[in-house]
Amino acid sequence: MDIHAEIELDICPICGGAGLLDEENDFCWAVYCMDCGAHTASIEYKTPGERFEVAKKAAHLWNIGKVLRSEPGE
């Protein structure tokens, strides 16, 4: 199953840019804005069976606007 094809991402809630669902080091998922750098928290999974559900949780956080953004210089 291609997780990226199964999960839809809304535009960035801050700038309207494209979101990227990213798996980090094969243990967690987060979504990043390709334009402004806003992102969700990274959500860890412990087993391969949790992988898809955790990806969906990261996408859900993004889609409801629960994102973090650092200002320049932080």
Image: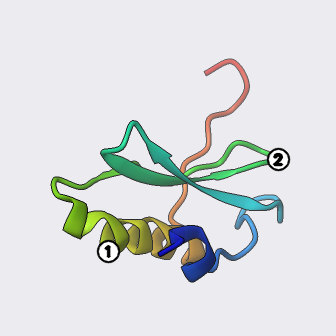
Residue at numbered disc 2: 35
Left or right, residue 49 beside residue 19: left
Secondary structure found at label 1:
helix
Which residue is outermost to the front?
Answer: 1
Horizontal and vertical percent position of residue 13: 70, 67
Horizontal and vertical percent position of residue 6: 55, 81
> Foreground residue, 29 or 61?
29
Q: Is residue 26 above or below residue 48?
A: above
User: Which picture quadrant has residue 4?
Assistant: bottom right
Horizontal and vertical percent position of residue 34: 77, 48
Secondary structure found at label 2:
loop
Which residue is outermost to the left?
Answer: 46
Horizontal and vertical percent position of residue 8: 63, 80
The residue drawn where x is 17% and y is 58% is: 47
The residue drawn where x is 32% and y is 74% is: 53
Q: Amino acid at mark 1?
A: Glu
Disc nearest the viewer among 2 and 1: 1
- How many marks the image carries: the answer is 2
Residue at numbered disc 1: 53
Label 1 crowd bin: few (<14), some (14–19), many (20+), radius 10 Å: few
Q: Amino acid at mark 2?
A: Asp
**What distance separates the C-alpha of mark 2 from that of mark 1?**
26 Å
